[in-house]
């Protein structure tokens, strides 16, 4: 740039000098002192025109046409080649005019300025660029500056592709690459960006297409030690942008009182961990955390292999915790569980009951039936002779169909999980004892057909079948066939279920034990009838119980009255009127002041107790010979042998032990009304309803032989009640 300015100053000074000399001589020719021409010109384009007097010729001086960029044609100067502003922006041309007549000469300078055009594209220094970035670099971190150059000068405009949420340019005219969000090394190992530059605004005002250039920026993410070891296998979860890997632990079964040689094989695989920072892959050390199971096991600190030191003599499960830590950074550590089940040695592997199973299935979700016995479902069952106490049933045996996800075995029953065309498949069923991985296999031939009778689902398999069908549906993207339908009707006896197929909808499964609306209606009607019958029985029993309580109260009051007759100071020959018997239906009435005992008195309370009344009756009947205290008087009920013929008269004597020689006899006197006809009984009942309330009279006549009780009117007491009372007595 300084050399260019020096050339211009020198040329200008020389030009002024020539002009001065020119003005001092006769003008034989003239020309413009400076002209402009655009770069990238065409050859032969006019640069300048020289005015010549007659007889004057013009030529370039010896050094007046540098680089031979121009030529003189007649009295004009033309461009002899294409000029480039970037090569030389100014050319000084020297011409000499010669007059033949006078031999006068005149030298004239011409300054040719080349006009700059936008004819160059921007250029990046490198393609591609390689940079590294720490994964923990915060937002706003500058990754690098990636500027382009343009020989034409002027501002440049940049764009970054693809649009990324992790990186961005500072501005459209500033190519500094910045971090927007931190990049996780485990998610992104490297990023490839395309940077484009152009020498015109992104929305150019003119129609000229801008010159542009592109380059690639390769950003390599550098891993940082920010994660602990991860036991394998593990399930990854993202929590708040951080990634954790959860291990479900390891399991193993050992035999009681037997030592396993070598390294223990674990489930789901060997115990090992990897550095969570995959780019660092630091060395891991292993150890037991909080004990080694009582010195039964040991762990290799470098490999994590578990081995037994001595046999285990106790049944159960031994739970251990394994710690994995980085050798160079013990703060980065994690733990997992190790469960070792101690069990009795298996002497017999499981055995399938058949070597070949043949089943027929009709629709998705339907249970396969036995091809040999079409009235029964196909039951796949394996027995284990180690479980003789349970009839050979090993609860730890699981069943599966090998190499096929079209069928599922649930509780020993085979189900189709996908919609299959009619065909016959030859498969293999596997029964595995999950405690020791012993297995048995058998051939399974399944025929898929339509219009078939299937059996109902056991209650325990309904939920598991639904889960299996959902898992199968998630695994496949095929849509169900809408041209078939399998409608299952609820079984009534739980034996078989008839399934009809009509072209409409997918299969519908009704679990075993389900009922329809008709069945529920019938069940409700039956329960209603039973409930009504129970209510009737309860009402009848309540009436009978209430009636029995009234009879017992009467008997108890009579017994209390009998006991009171022997008390001292009792006046003989006095007539008693028992008003308590005036209203038989009023079980709570004792009568007025002439009753046997006043309400609320101790004697009355004793009478009301069922236990007291029952004991009194038992003493009078079955327990007459039991031991009694000296203070108690022996009361013996005796019915007289003498028959009274008076109508409505009944005699009861409570004979005290006056005559020790008297014999205890009980004579039931038949009622004279028993001989009457039914018509007489009806007439008597009508008369009794119209009469007043009956009264019971205790006569003092003939007290020497007992107490006479005269019933003036039977009242509402029927013969049936009398017979019941007599039987109770």
Image (cartoon, helix red, strand yellow):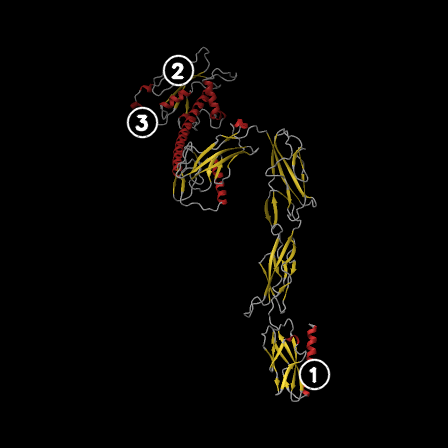
**Distance CA(mark 2)–CA(mark 3):** 31 Å
Q: Is residue 155 visible?
A: yes
Disc 3: which residue: 686
Residue wearing tag 2:
667
Q: Going from the N terminus, do you reach mark 1 or mark 3 first? A: 1
> Is 707 situated above or below 348?
above
Quadrant including the N terminus: bottom right
Provide the residue designation for mark 1. Answer: 17
Instruction: From the viewer's side, name the closer residue of 304 and 443.
Output: 443
Q: Residue at x 65, y 59 (%)?
A: 144
Of residue 42 and residue 146, the one placed in the foreground of this image is 42
Distance of label 1 from label 3 (alpha carbons): 173 Å
Please tell me whether mark 2 sits on a helix, a strand or a loop. Answer: loop
- Determine the image quadrant of residue 284: top right
- CB under 8 Å between callouts 1 and 3? no
Q: Is residue 260 above or below residue 560?
A: below
Pick the front one: 14 or 302: 14
């Amino acid at each position: 740039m300084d050399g260019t300015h020096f050339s211009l100053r020198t040329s200008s000074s020389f030009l002024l000098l020539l002009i001065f000399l020119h003005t001092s001589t006769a003008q034989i020719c003239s020309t413009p002192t400076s002209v402009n021409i655009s770069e990238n010109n065409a050859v032969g384009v006019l640069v300048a025109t020289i005015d010549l007097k007659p007889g004057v010729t013009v030529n370039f001086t010896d050094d007046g046409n540098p680089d031979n960029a121009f030529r003189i044609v007649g009295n004009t100067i033309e461009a002899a080649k294409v000029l480039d502003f970037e090569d030389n922006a100014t050319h000084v041309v020297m011409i000499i005019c010669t007059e033949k007549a006078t031999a006068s000469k005149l030298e004239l300078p011409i300054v040719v300025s080349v006009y700059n055009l936008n004819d160059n594209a921007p250029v990046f220094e490198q393609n591609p660029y390689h940079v590294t970035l720490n994964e923990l670099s915060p937002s706003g971190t500058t990754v690098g500056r990636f500027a382009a150059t343009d020989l034409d000068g002027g501002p440049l405009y940049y764009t970054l592709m693809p649009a990324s949420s992790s990186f961005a340019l500072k501005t459209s005219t500033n190519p500094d690459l910045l971090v927007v969000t931190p990049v996780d090394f485990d998610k992104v190992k490297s990023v490839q960006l395309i940077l484009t530059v152009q020498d015109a605004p992104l929305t150019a005002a003119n129609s000229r297409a801008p010159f542009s250039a592109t380059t690639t920026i390769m950003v390599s993410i550098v891993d940082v030690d920010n994660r602990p070891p991860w036991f394998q296998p593990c399930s990854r979860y993202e929590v708040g942008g951080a990634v954790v890997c959860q291990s479900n632990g390891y399991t193993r079964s050992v035999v009681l009182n037997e030592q396993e040689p070598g390294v223990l094989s674990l489930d789901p695989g060997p115990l090992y961990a990897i550095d969570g920072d995959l780019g660092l892959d630091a060395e891991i050390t292993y150890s037991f955390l909080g004990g080694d199971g009582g010195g039964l096991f040991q762990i290799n600190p470098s490999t994590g292999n578990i081995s037994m030191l001595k046999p285990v003599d106790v049944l159960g499960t031994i739970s251990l915790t394994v710690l994995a830590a980085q050798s160079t950074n013990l703060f980065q550590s994690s733990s997992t569980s190790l469960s070792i089940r101690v069990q009795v040695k298996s002497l017999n592997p499981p055995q399938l009951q058949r070597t070949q199973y043949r089943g027929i299935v009709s629709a998705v979700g339907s249970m396969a039936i036995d091809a040999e016995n079409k009235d029964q479902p196909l039951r796949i069952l394996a027995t284990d002779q180690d479980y003789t106490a349970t009839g050979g049933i090993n609860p730890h045996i699981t069943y599966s169909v090998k190499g096929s996800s079209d069928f599922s075995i649930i509780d020993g029953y085979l189900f189709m999980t996908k919609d299959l065309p009619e065909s016959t498949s030859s498969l293999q069923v596997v029964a595995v004892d999950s405690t020791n991985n012993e297995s048995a296999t058998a051939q399974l031939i399944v025929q898929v057909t339509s219009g078939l009778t299937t059996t109902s689902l056991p209650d325990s398999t309904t939920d598991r079948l639904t889960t299996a069908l959902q898992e199968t549906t998630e695994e496949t993207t095929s849509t169900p066939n809408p041209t078939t339908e399998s409608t299952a009707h609820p079984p009534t006896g739980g034996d078989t279920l008839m399934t009809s197929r009509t072209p409409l909808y997918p299969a519908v499964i009704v679990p075993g034990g389900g009922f329809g609306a008709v069945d529920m209606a019938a069940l409700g009607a039956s329960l209603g009838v039973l409930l009504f019958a129970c209510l009737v029985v309860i009402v009848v029993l309540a009436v009978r119980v209430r009636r029995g309580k009234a009879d017992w109260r009467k008997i108890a009051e009579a017994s209390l009255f009998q006991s009171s007759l022997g008390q001292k100071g009792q006046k003989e020959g006095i007539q008693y009127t028992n008003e308590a018997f005036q209203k038989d239906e009023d079980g709570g009435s004792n009568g007025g002041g002439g009753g046997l005992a006043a309400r609320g008195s101790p004697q009355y309370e004793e009478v009301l107790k069922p236990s007291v009344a029952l004991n009194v009756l038992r003493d009078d009947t079955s327990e007459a010979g039991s031991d009694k205290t000296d203070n108690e008087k022996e009361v013996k009920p005796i019915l007289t042998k003498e028959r009274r013929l008076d109508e409505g008269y009944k005699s009861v004597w409570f004979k005290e032990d006056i005559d020790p020689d008297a014999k205890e006899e009980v004579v039931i006197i038949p009622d004279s009304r028993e001989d009457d006809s039914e018509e007489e009984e009806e007439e008597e009942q009508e008369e009794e309803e119209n009469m007043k309330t009956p009264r019971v009279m205790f006569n003092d006549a003939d007290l020497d032989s007992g107490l006479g009780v005269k019933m003036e009117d039977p009242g509402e007491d029927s013969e049936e009640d009398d017979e019941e009372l007599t039987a109770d007595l």
